């Protein structure tokens, strides 16, 4: 059985326990739509949204000798950054493998000698 993009996003953001899901399927689909159906980018956006929702809670507390730090927000934002970087790297790798150069570059014209333009990428 092939997983849907919604399922893949859920897997990447650890939101796959049905009874405690943070996002509905419609919300996950909205993230996919916003990010052009690119799973890694949709997962990054979902994590950023989730982290924004968590910022209202307590991040750390100290009571006497006991203290704790909750890193849920920073962990989600770090993972979102990793997913975005992974996607960018996959694009760069694909472009390098296909030997693709940018469509636009700089052209230097030599009007004095009436030569062909020299292109720089």
Image (tube, helix red, strand yellow):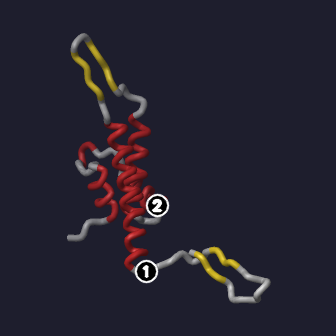
Q: Name the residue under label 1.
A: 99
Mark 2 vs mark 1, foreground winner is 1
- Whether residue 42 is visible, yes or no, is no
Rendering coords of residue 105 (x, y %)? 61, 75
Q: Residue lying farthest top?
A: 64
The image quarter in which residue 6 lies: bottom left
The image quarter in which residue 119 lies: bottom right
The quarter of the rendered structure image containing the C terminus is bottom right
Q: Which of 46 and 91 is in front in this view?
A: 91
Report the side of 86 relative to 64 (left or right). Answer: right
- Name the N-terminal-most of marks 2 and 1: 2
Write the residue at 64% across / 82% down: 118
Q: Relative to 61, does residue 49 appear above or below in the rendering?
A: below
Write the residue at 34% across / 48% down: 79
Q: Nearer the viewer, residue 69 or 46?
A: 69
Rendering coords of residue 108 (x, y %)? 69, 78
Write the residue at 43% across / 56% down: 31
Write the residue at 59% across / 76% down: 120
CA–CA distance between discs 2 and 1? Answer: 26 Å
The quarter of the rendered structure image containing the N terminus is bottom left
Rendering coords of residue 33 (x, y %)? 46, 62
| Disc 2, SS | loop
Bin the neighbour count of mark 1 within 10 Å (Cα to Cα): few under 14, some 14-19, many 20 and up: few
Q: Name the residue under label 2.
A: 35
């Amino acid at each position: 059985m092939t997983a849907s993009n919604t399922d893949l996003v859920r897997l990447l953001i650890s939101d796959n326990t049905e009874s405690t899901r943070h996002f509905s399927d419609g919300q996950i689909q909205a993230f996919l739509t916003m990010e052009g159906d690119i799973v890694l980018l949709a997962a990054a956006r979902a994590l950023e949204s989730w982290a924004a929702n968590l910022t209202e809670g307590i991040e750390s507390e100290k009571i006497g000798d006991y203290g704790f730090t909750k890193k849920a927000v920073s962990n989600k934002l770090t993972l979102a950054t990793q997913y975005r970087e992974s996607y960018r790297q996959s694009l760069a790798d694909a472009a390098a493998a296909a030997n693709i150069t940018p469509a636009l570059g700089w052209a230097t014209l030599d009007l004095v000698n009436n030569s062909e333009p020299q292109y720089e990428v």
